Amino acid sequence: MDFIQMNGKHILVTGATSGIGKSTAVLLSRLGARVAIAGRREERLKETLSAMEGEGHSMHVLDVSLLDELEGRVKEMVAQYGKFDGYVHSAGTVNNLPLKNYTPARLDQIMRTNFSSYFEMVRVLSKKGRFNEGMSIVGVSSISAYVGASAQAAYGASKAAMNGAMRCLARELAEKGIRLNNVLPAGTNTEMYQEYLALRGEMKGGDGTPAKSAGRNYLGMNEPEDVANAIIFLLSPASRQITGVELPVDGGYMSC
Amino acid sequence: MTEREKLALLEDMLELDEGDLTVDTVLDDIDEYDSMAKLSLIVLMEDEFDVKLTADVIRGFETVGDIVALMEK
Ligand SMILES: NC(=O)c1ccc[n+]([C@@H]2O[C@H](COP(=O)([O-])OP(=O)(O)OC[C@H]3O[C@@H](n4cnc5c(N)ncnc54)[C@H](OP(=O)(O)O)[C@@H]3O)[C@@H](O)[C@H]2O)c1
């Protein structure tokens, strides 16, 4: 018997067009899950789908920042493809704004995309008839919830908000048999991080290595698969006694 | 927008006094043109001029005039 059992499980993954979400969707498909993949870019969803194995997957062009649409879209998914056994919230965006460049609208945009969408998705997925017994929800937060960096105030706040909500909701939804956990990646080799490094490298006049983190993630930079592995463990029954946890996937960063 | 108005936008962003900058000012000579200022510049150019600056483009800037040249309006 395999340690991680995902056979026939129906899992929704947002942010599946790229990076961590894409890697999670592909790995889940290899483990026998039926995966509903979501993101804004249709072409990129098709690419993810073609990299996946197995059958019964579905594809959903979805902007998670359009909060009022999320319940209707989830209802449609359930009606057409069945209840969910798991949800991975990997949709997210990063900005590099110094404080003086913020406007209320900019702050709202990042909080909505990273945090409010997570909250709303958990709310609509945890309604009766939309999930199977033992559903597991994994949010992709970040070590930025704990590690201060200039020009990252809203991003860090949005990830800390995800963690705060997750811990409360883990208790609240336990009576429905739903578990919630977050993974907190450090720098992970994705499009988002490459863009961030290019910018930071230039800002520091260096080679793209963020000076303060050099040496802290002493196991080296994550690949998306490293984060996907942790997510899938938390989705699987192998972690059935784990809820309300923030799991760093950070090559040791938080231990320093 | 006149050249002076464009320079004024940069002076405001860098919290300099009016008239401190000319198109010939060398960026490396401006103490205030630091990493945070470069991030602010990205936002300014996108908001005001619909120009998306990449790290490569920013690295290529030598004088204030190089930035002003991209401010088309
Ligand atoms: N890479 C890192 O170093 C790192 C570290 C810590 C945490 N994280 C977190 O990991 C998560 C995934 O990021 P990544 O590194 O895999 O970056 P990525 O490759 O840029 O992926 C981001 C994903 O989010 C989706 N997305 C963004 N805005 C969306 C919206 N409004 N609606 C729906 N989907 C949206 C994108 O899809 P579309 O553009 O197609 O919509 C894309 O699939 C993010 O939450 C990020 O904050 C990343």
Image: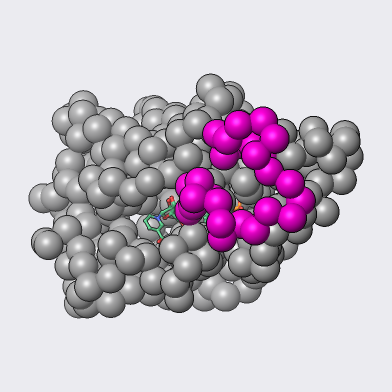
Query: Magenta stretch: residue A132 in it?
Result: no
* Magenta-tinted stretch: B10-36
Scheme by which the image is coloured: one colour
Q: Nearer the viewer, residue B73 or A131?
A: B73
Magenta-colored segment: predominant secondary structure:
loop
Residue B17 in the magenta stretch? The answer is yes
Relative to A76, residue A31 above or below:
below
Query: Would residue A2 appear left or right of A142 to someone viewing this image?
Result: left
Front-lying residue, A7 or A64 = A64
Above/below status of A106 relative to A187: above
Picture residue at 67% right of the left edge, 30% below the top: B18
The residue located at (38%, 38%) in the rendering is A153
Across and down, in percent, residue A141 comes to 33, 48
Residue A149 to residue A26: above or below: above
Q: Position of residue A145 (x, y in %)?
A: 28, 44
Residue drawn at point x = 50 percent, y = 46 percent: B32
Figure disc tally: 0
Q: Quadrant of the N terminus of chain A?
A: bottom left
Residue A180 in the image, given as x and y percentages of width and height: 25, 42
Q: Please indicate, yes or no, whether residue A197 appears anywhere in the rendered image.
A: no
Q: Nearer the viewer, residue B56 or A217?
A: B56
The answer to whether A142 appears left or right of A121 in the picture is left
Q: Image quarter for residue A17?
A: bottom right
Identify the image quadrant of the C terminus of chain A.
bottom left
- Residue A224: image location, x then y, percent: 40, 70
Which residue: 56% across, 60% down? B28
